[in-house]
Image (spheres, helix red, strand yellow):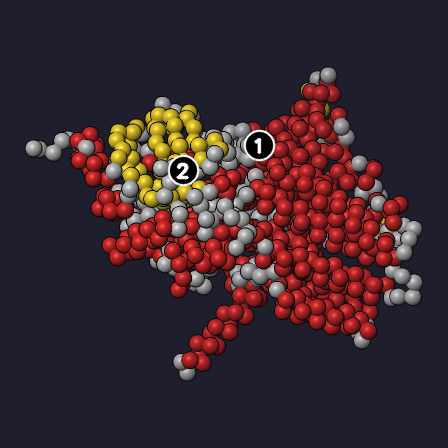
Amino acid sequence: MLRPLLLLLAATVLLALLPLVLGPFHVRVGLSMFLSAGLALSWYILGGFAAYYSFGHTVFIGIGAFAAALSRDLWVSGHWAGQLLLGVGSAACVSAAVAALIAWPILRLRGHYFTIAMLAVALVCAEAVSAFPVFQGAMGVSLPNIAPPGMRVERFYYWAALALLLVTVVIAMLIARARLGYGLYAIREDEDAAMMLGVPTTRLKITAFIISAALTGSFGALYAFNLGYITTDSVFRGALSLEMIVHALVGGMGSIFGPIIGAVAMTALTKVALADMLEYHLAITGLVVIVVVIAAPEGLIGVVGRWRRNRRHRGRNP
Amino acid sequence: MSTFIQTVVNGVLFGGILSIAAVGFSLIFGVMNVINLAHGVFVIGGAYAALVAWSTLGIDPLLALPVIMALGYVLGSQFQRHVMQPAVRRGNPVAALLVTFGFALVVVNLLTVWFSSAVRNISPSYAFVNLRLGDLSIDAVRLVCFGIGLVMIAALSLFMRRSRLGRVIRATAQSELGARLCGVDSKGVYAATFGVGSAFGAASGVLIGMMLPFTPAEETLWTVYAFIVVTLGGVGSPAGAMLGGVLMGVAATLTQTYLGAVYTNMVMFLILLLMLLVRPHGILGSAFRASR
Amino acid sequence: MSIVLRARGLTKRYGDMVVVNDVNFDVPAGGVMSLIGPNGAGKSTIFNLLTGYTPLNAGSVEFAGQMLNGMPTHRIAALGIARAFQIARPFRGLSVRDNVRVGALFGRAGARDVEASIDLALRLANLADLAEEPASTLTIGQLRKLELARAVAARPTLLLADEPLAGLVPAESDEILASFRDMVNHGMTILLVEHDMPAVMQISDHVVVLEAGAFIAEGRPEVVARNPRVIEAYLGQELPQ
């Protein structure tokens, strides 16, 4: 565990220094990459470890965003660090609470029933946030700028997102090596066999679900702060759910770094390489999904792994 | 009281449309155990095709209906054969969900680019006629569409029970291996089933385009509506789609009248969630498999 | 002789069909006890009842000082009963070692001394040289050993082995039987369901015979083998004199 942690720290330091040499556009692309990567990895904690594919995870982005916005009175006066921590913290807590509430009934469902049920949860919540005036979803809520005076706004959010991503990666690494992780793998491979081996499947699934929700909500809060003004439609978006899944698939579902690699690759593709085809963003994402599922089901990590194995073989038999 | 009856009548009429919008989805789900997340784009696509026929070519949508159904069949069956089958072979349990979702994204994007996200509708010459029956007011277009929908569902039911292809589809649905051992080309059956489901989806789109305003982004809604109908009424059978559709339609209009239009979708989605948790195979159960 | 598990009045009905009919037995600590009987005798169902996978219609199971009635499967496993299945259910995406690790982490010992439990289990099941291989590449004989290793890694007091020798060649069977002897030496009690009579005679200290869900005989293997009721159950009639 020590060596990967040191590498991680080194990478983080390097990434943290980049805004000092990059222009605002690239800093914003980086910010976007960190948000997408963090969201994809948060989704992966349930979808990758336990293979419970949630098609409605945007619900936690929305809940986190609105929790941060509506808890304004808690943090609006104070040091920017406190504002960030409290805003993100309330988002994490509310998301975790909602997840805890629905976990037991929802996680009893298997396979595509779970998938669609999460989609239904997202739809219900989005409608509720719009319909009930207390949430101000239809009219929208604004969030004050919490970047410290003197610091460029995009740099502040870049660093905040990087820090949250680092926290998420460390949590994922800890889970992967712990009893929880192995239990989730067992659930992914054969849930009934796992149960008979003594794995407390319900408890572990609920734990993973709550952790995933809290992390997703935290990124939702950052997303909201970055947007500055949120409505139901801007944060409870089906496209966001799909992006989390696509990023994890594209990168590779076999490793916690898959979602990160996939998010970075897809962001680079859509925001940089194909930036002037923005109106085709959805279609590109859809095509990528189809191609990856058919041609590269193990994602980029799998493709690289296969390529390296082939090279080794060819080396042995010239 | 008359408000209540009017609401229920409206609900039944709306429900008929929901039924035909769902029957194709139900067939695909029942036979292939696939949740077709591209269903909504066939519905919306049908509406846009009817729009093109009507506004550009001057053809009444009901006349264009058979052609649009045929187009839907071809597109659906080819997509199933050339995209879904390879995807599912890879073994990922959500392959079909992902690939249909991806297809939906592509089509929605293209429709938005071609037609813009402006709200459209199709208003043929008989569009704003209202029939009166005592205290009740019935929209002529809705009644005609309801009638057509009923005929089509009955036709599908007959087809599934009496025709050779219908029998083959049912056999494959109950036991694919058994059917193959009897010489059935199961891959062809699946492609055909998906085609039939898509054709009915497109047909419902033509009818919906005549009754309601539509935009490309609504496709997700129609997929979810179809799913609600199926989880309410039952998987795989036209009768289940009919039952679920009418129940859902009445629930929708009742919510609209007595709670407020802004709550309609929320109530619908809550019904979906509850049914998934309690009885996901619907009131009538699955037509092809033992329901859990 | 202490008793590891006490089963009283075990009964299981599916509709009108009584699959297990008021069965009683004690499993003595240390050693191998075998449950035998013709097909349909209810042996696998009894395993399901003991592990809590199937609820009892009547009867009780006492183990480790507790009544197991109504306890969820994973809690029974954590108490110290482990099961190795006839149809192997490996975690195909994991290596052999990680498969066994799951057994160790969620068994009686929990997360203590996990590596030691894994190593012991691999050694007892004769799988140490395959530890890093993905479970998807194993042969049926190796998969059986993996089932046993996963169960043993949980450091159970009682191991339920469901037809572990089915479909194996004699060499593979001998390996499994030798593993059982090792496990017993390490303090485990084994409850075995098996059809391979020579193996049962060879390995068992005690045998219980069932037929059509009911108990018909028990005792030392040689004694049971000569019991006319048992012979009749297997062959359908008494052997001609």
In the figure, A276 relative to C20: above or below?
A: below
Question: Residue sitting at 51 percent across and 48 percent down?
Answer: C109
Q: Residue furthest left?
A: C241
Quadrant position of the C terminus of chain C in the picture: top left
- Density class for disc 2 (Cα within 10 Å; few <14, some 14-19, many ≥20) is some
> Which quadrant of the structure image shows residue A254?
bottom right
In the figure, B136 relative to B76: above or below?
A: above
3D distance between C-alphas at marks 2 and 1 = 41 Å
Is the residue at mark 2 from the same chain as the one at mark 1?
no
Percent coordinates x, y for residue A21 in the rendering: 80, 75
In contact (CB < 8 Å): disc 2 and disc 1: no
Task: Kindly tell me whether residue B158 is visible in this rendering.
Answer: no
Q: Nearer the viewer, residue C47 or C186?
A: C186
Percent coordinates x, y for residue A41 in the rendering: 65, 57
- Density class for disc 1 (Cα within 10 Å; few <14, some 14-19, many ≥20) is few
Q: Secondary structure at mark 2?
A: strand
Q: Secondary structure at mark 1?
A: helix
Question: Residue sitting at 64 percent across and 40 percent down?
Answer: A103
Query: Disc 1 residue type?
Result: Val
Quadrant position of the N terminus of chain C in the picture: top left
Q: In the drawing, does residue B276 fall left or right of residue B188? A: right
Q: Residue furthest front?
A: C1
Q: In the drawing, does residue B183 fall left or right of residue B143? A: left
Question: Residue sitting at 74 percent across and 70 percent down?
Answer: A13
Which mark is on residue C4? 2
Question: Residue sitting at 55 percent across and 44 percent down?
Answer: A201
Total label count? 2
Query: Disc 2 residue type?
Result: Val
Q: Residue furthest bottom?
A: A318
Provide the residue designation for mark 1. B278
